[in-house]
Amino acid sequence: MKHSIFNYINREINGQTLLFNTAKETLVELDQKTLDQYERNDLDSDTQAAMADLGFLVADDVDELASLEFKWKNNFTSSKKLELTVMVTDACNFRCPYCYQAHSTHNMGIEETNRLCRYLMKSIDNGVEVINIHWFGGEPLLNTAPIFYIEHFLKEKGIKGSSNVTTNGYLLTDELLHRFREETRIHAFQITLDGTENLHNKTRRHVSGEPTYKRICSNIVSATQNSFFVIIRLNMTKENQNLDAFLAEINALGLPRSRYFIHITNAHEFTNSEKLSNFYFNTAEEYSIAYDRAQDSFTKAHYKFPRNVTRTAGCSFESGNTFLVGTDLKLYFCSSCECTDEFEQGYIDESGQIHLNEHYRNRINASPFADDECRNCVVLPLCMGGCTYCRLRQKKFCIPERYFLDKYIHKLYTEALSQKEAAHP
């Protein structure tokens, strides 16, 4: 047996040593004797077996990088699951400064909706058994007709899977919630709150100039009361990076913890974004400092702190049978790219047949395992190369944990101790 290349030693916890494996996300505490035996590769048989089960030891003939790359490549093979993000409109009633979209007004109409249904039927005929749909925009609640039409089609056909909606939440009325619950497979919404009320209203701007925070919060409460799950997203900038007050405001809404979680991400500057000074984080290292503090804020507020978890690819779009469908049924790179020729991956024709182009083939061949820096990075299993969009544009943006791995391991350790104490008071 040999040590995993994804082991990382943290020696600074109250005289103890922590050993963390990024591939399995396993963590053990070692006393000095066991550490010495581990480093000499001289563990007793029982301890060696336990360490192998946890991923810290692997067979001598195992090539961990090759296995990880196989998992990444296998993610693009055909599957019985279809994952679609569908833009029903690119119009929006908000004007957020970091938005990458141009906000022209193109709506998915009945012809495109029927064509999409034909594609879904062909997918089912070709062996797809599960169809998950993520409704997207623009602001998708400005054009709900395709949503209800296709959701009715999927329910009528008894297709396995579920749907969710990314919305700014401003138009999420009780009437819509009732219809979504009764007529669709929609079970969740992703809704952005960009910090405390004042900070949110500064960036999440309604076209009328009216503040949006209180109305969105009220709609989030209604959604959870109607048994929907809500992902509260915060696009972190230099202005809203201190989260203590924000988390207190979320807690004051009285939402059941089982009905929501909070997702933190970096507000990138795109081509169409407003050019603001001292607003965006300039580097991954700079963002990691804010993310580190954000994790601490979550812990203080008694939330499980956000983290990047092991995955098969850098993002959910890096999978077979996974596409962003534009309003005109052209296929695009992901939900964070401009809908331009540069990012077009193919299209769905009038008969419902899918056509993929050279851009798609280039995308699935853009392996992070061709990058020596990634291949030699201990956190590779946590990020799997990160965002392909950024990588292809020579803007590789490493996950924050890479820059404070010792502190991250300490947080995992502290969280595990707290959970143990809670389970055995």
Image (tube, rainbow, N blue to C red):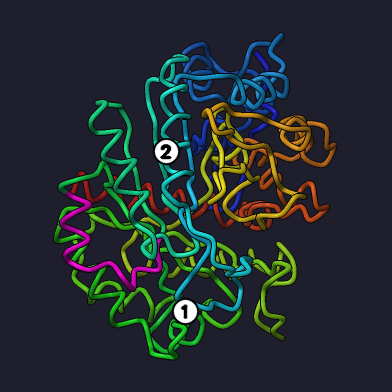
Position of residue 174 measured from the top left corner of the image (x, y, whole percent): 17, 66
**Left or right: residue 298 compared with residue 100:** left
Position of residue 362 measured from the top left corner of the image (x, y, whole percent): 78, 34
Answer yes or no: is residue 117 visible.
yes
Q: What residue is shown at x 58% (from left), y 31% (from top)?
A: 319
Which residue is the site of mark 1? 204
**Left or right: residue 82 compared with residue 291:** left
**Left or right: residue 162 compared with residue 408:** left
Q: What residue is shown at x 59% (from left), y 75% (from top)?
A: 237
User: Closer to the camera, 293 or 313?
Assistant: 313
Whole-angstrom CA distance, mark 1 to mark 2, is 33 Å
Which residue is the site of mark 2? 114
For label 2, the SS is: helix
Position of residue 371 measured from the top left corner of the image (x, y, whole percent): 83, 37
User: Closer to the camera, 303 or 112?
Assistant: 112
User: Closer to the camera, 394 or 240?
Assistant: 394
**Magenta residue span:** 167-181
**In the figure, residue 100 lies in which quadrant?**
bottom right
Task: Report the amino acid beneath label 2.
Answer: Asn
Answer yes or no: is residue 17 visible.
no
Task: Report the amino acid beneath label 1.
Answer: Arg
Q: What residue is shown at x 41% (from left), y 72% (from top)?
A: 193
Q: Is residue 339 above or below residue 274?
A: above
**Left or right: residue 419 compared with residue 17:** left
Tag in front: 1 or 2: 2
Q: Residues within 10 Å of mark 1 (few under 14, many from 20)?
A: many
User: Closer to the camera, 382 or 315?
Assistant: 315
**Which label's residue is closer to the chain start, 1 or 2?**
2
Q: What residue is shown at x 30% (from left), y 51% (from top)?
A: 188
Q: Residues within 10 Å of mark 2 (few under 14, many from 20)?
A: some
Position of residue 58 measured from the top left corner of the image (x, y, whole percent): 62, 17
Location of the N terminus (image quadrant): top right
